[in-house]
Image (spheres, rainbow, N blue to C red):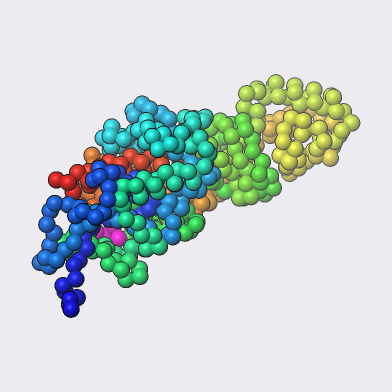
Amino acid sequence: MKSSSDIAIKVWDLVVIGGGPSGMMCAGRAGEVLGGGQDDAGGKKKVNINNKKDVQLAKILLLEKNEKLGQKLSITGGGRCNITNAEFDNRAFLSNFPEAKEFLFSPFSKFSAKDTFTFFESKGLSLVVEARKRAFPETQKASDVMHVMERYVKDNGVAIKTGVQVVSVTQDGDNPFLIKTKDGEKFYSRHIAFATGGLARVQERGVSAGGFSILQKLGHTIKASNPNIVPLTTSAKWVHAISGVTLSFMAIRFKQNGVTKLKKTGKILFTHFGISGPLILNSSFEVKKLLANGSVEASIDLFPDTEENELDRRVWRLFEQNKNKKLKNSLPEMMESSLAEQVLNLPDIKLAEKEANAVTKEERKKLVKKMKNLTFPITGTLGLEHAVIASGGVPPEEVDFRTMVSRVNPNLYLLGDVLDINRPSGGFSLQLCWTTGFVAGTDIANKIRN
Ligand SMILES: Cc1cc2nc3c(=O)[nH]c(=O)nc-3n(C[C@H](O)[C@H](O)[C@H](O)COP(=O)(O)OP(=O)(O)OC[C@H]3O[C@@H](n4cnc5c(N)ncnc54)[C@H](O)[C@@H]3O)c2cc1C
């Protein structure tokens, strides 16, 4: 009978922790370079664990805390998945990563947005490009992206274990890493890729960012997390009252002490807590910085292409044509009716019940000014639980971006949202996952082979 010390210890060549987009790309790519399959011994190198010789080598294992891979991936882009941004000039693409672009030139020279197109299209998933170069699967289904990635991982011989939460990773000298799970399972691995994600939406759908404390214990610095792409809140009740209304063309100014600090033009969505939509989400990082210095006021111009005098003439004509109508019944000809009602009921306007023929010139001009300068206070953000992207994580200085290997441990790799890299929405986050996952997977596989 074999004693427990005789039982072979299985040592994986690579364990990827986290089955999101970056982890799946890394595991699949490493398997692809190694030629797939799990049966033959993965590496050529002999591995000893505390001088135990009876060691069985295996290739790649992907560990995921949730029961399914890629839960967050399947809710991206409102369920459509903005898979990348079709800006094929790397320099232009990386201008969207203001603080980290110098780090990213090297990995993007190996796997760029163009490569993402080739990758998915070669696997039968055609991509289409929408406004602002945002690319989506032609099927408009994030679940299809998920399935391509899952198949990529499986077809390349990666072993998958879901429902497994890693709680610690330690390394004794030159021995392989020892990975322990919440349920007391142990795994040994010569290389580890951390793809455990960031702190945005940690509560939602069981998405968890359990990697940071483990990385800290392995010697990495972890920058505090802050919501970066996140809806903004206001205390103005009239904004809450028009929840669901979208203005497809307006200009918004964010002001501090009466001075405009940021101006954006485009679409805005009013919600029961404040304002949202891509334009607002992409302004939130700067607005949050302003909020740290004091109060912030938003001012919306409902007719950004029309000068105030011209707008006044349009309103005057509307009143002339609807002399005996109450303004609450005529103004909706010029703007969304629930918004018109709220504007007319503002304490300094109070014109909803007045007929047009009773409105004075001063009252009309005041209304026009309001339509050009609809102000409300910004009180904050919806916080990490509602953030699309959170800052924080491992600072880029602690990673060698040529390979995505940690500068703290030569067998540890860091991917995707684990990294503290700020960027806007528009497909840039997932591209960062595809790129870092691909580069790390390639490097790890080459190390294993040699
Ligand atoms: C609502 C929403 C919509 C978005 N839409 C887009 C979009 O359209 N386009 C875009 O580019 N970006 C989008 N993003 C951002 C994008 O989803 C993320 O940047 C991306 O998912 C990060 O991938 P990742 O692999 O780094 O981490 P994640 O996707 O967060 O995956 C990490 C995985 O690791 C697992 N894990 C964590 N800790 C452990 C542990 N201790 N043990 C085992 N497993 C663990 C998690 O369960 C998770 O599955 C969106 C984000 C949100 C929240």
Let me know if residue 201 appears in the view.
Answer: yes
Residue 240 horizontal/vertical position (percent): 66, 48
Above or below 115: residue 148: below
Horizontal side of residue 115 vs 302, given as left or right:
left
Residue 52 horizontal/vertical position (percent): 12, 67
Number of numbered labels in the structure image: 0
Residue furthest right as drawn: 324
Q: Which residues are magenta?
A: 214-221
* Figure quadrant of the C terminus: top left
Asked where in the image residue 55 lies, by quadrant, the reply is bottom left
Residue at 63 percent of width and 43 percent of height: 270
* Figure quadrant of the N terminus: bottom left
Q: Relative to the observer, which residue lies in front, 383 or 372?
A: 383
Q: Relative to the observer, which residue lies in front, 316 or 417?
A: 417
Residue at 28 percent of width and 37 percent of height: 107
Q: Relative to the observer, which residue lies in front, 200 or 55?
A: 55
Residue at 61 percent of width and 50 percent of height: 273
Horizontal side of residue 171 vs 238, given as left or right:
left
Residue 76 horizontal/vertical position (percent): 49, 45
Residue at 25 percent of width and 45 percent of height: 35
Horizontal side of residue 109 vs 245, given as left or right:
left
Asked where in the image residue 397 lies, by quadrant, the reply is top left
Does the magenta portion include 281? Answer: no
